[in-house]
Image (spheres, helix red, strand yellow):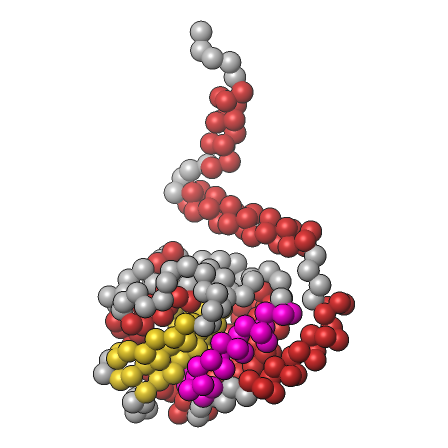
Amino acid sequence: VVAPLSELRIVLLGWIVSGKSAAGNTIFNHEKFPMQRTRTCTSHTGVVNGRSVTVLDTPGWWKYFFDPEYAPAAILESVRQSRHMQFPHAMILVIPGETSFRNEQKKIIKEYMATFGEDVWRHTIVLFTWADRFPDISIEQHIESEGEALQWLIEKCRNRYHVFDSSNWNNRDQVTELLQKIDEMVAENSLFCLNTQCAAEENIHDTDTQQDEDISLDVDCVLKLLQQEFNNRLEEFESKLKHLGMDFTGYLETKSDHSMSGPPN
């Protein structure tokens, strides 16, 4: 059994609308982070389970494309503004549990996490949020069903992951278990040193040389990915309805026929 640390410093990372702020609020059992898009670094220190916990909520990144100016300018600057956070105990990568995770998301996460250097993976835990939205399957079943991309991420983090029901702050067991996993990770790997100066210089150089050919923003591609996400959500919704014995497509067609027919005599 690993002895609990007297103090914990946690950095929350993730894309926009991933539930980072909700995760921070769940940890403190109180709304300390506004439930809106995080545009600047926000931190809070409080007592959780008898020990001091500091959480740094960083600006969210885009799910579908890499912004070459954002990574060094926003994430690293956020860490610099909180100097004591340059030696965090854990990097928490927040992933919404109900959303799809494909090769596009794998590529984007690889590029953003590279901002902190390869060693960051040894100090990262994947946190799935909104567990209440997929109550019928276990998180292990979800990881298996999502396929190679999500499995790669879990393996990259050495099979460290956790689940939050972000709608139920009163469930303190889920917070206790996360803090225990952080204690175990620190016992294995010690602290993570965020060498922001070196990381920024390396990534700015890489971005300058690769921006035009590797990470240019193609609007058509983004629209295609958004359409794919919509289709995935629709398929999941239809599947759930069919499980309940309902035909969503037939219902829509019936509604369409009725709307096109003339008024009743």
Q: Looking at the picture, how far across and down is residue 109, in whole percent?
A: 57, 70
Q: Looking at the picture, how far across and down is residue 242, in whole percent?
A: 44, 42
Is residue 228 shown in magenta?
A: no
- Report the side of 24 relative to 60 (left or right): left
Q: Can residue 159 be seen in this view?
A: no
Q: Looking at the picture, how far across and down is residue 35, in whole percent?
A: 38, 60
Which of the 4 image quadrants contains residue 212? Answer: bottom right
Q: How many marks are shown on the rendered structure?
A: 0
Magenta span: chief secondary structure: helix
Magenta segment boundaries in residue numbering:
68-90
Task: Tell me what residue is drawn at x 59 percent, y 69 percent.
Answer: 70
Q: Can residue 30 be seen in this view?
A: yes
Task: Tell me what residue is drawn at x 53 percent, y 83 percent.
Answer: 120
- Report the side of 159 relative to 1 (left or right): right
Task: Tell me what residue is drawn at x 32 percent, y 68 percent.
Answer: 32
In the image, 47 versus 167, the foreground residue is: 47
- The quadrant of the image that shows the N terminus is bottom left
Q: Residue farthest to the front?
A: 81
In the image, 98 versus 30, the foreground residue is: 30
Relative to 41, say whether 198 is above or below. Answer: below
Q: Looking at the picture, how far across and down is residue 110, in whole percent?
A: 60, 73
Task: Tell me what residue is drawn at x 70 percent, y 80 percent.
Answer: 205
- The quadrant of the image that shows the C terminus is top left
Is residue 86 shown in magenta?
A: yes
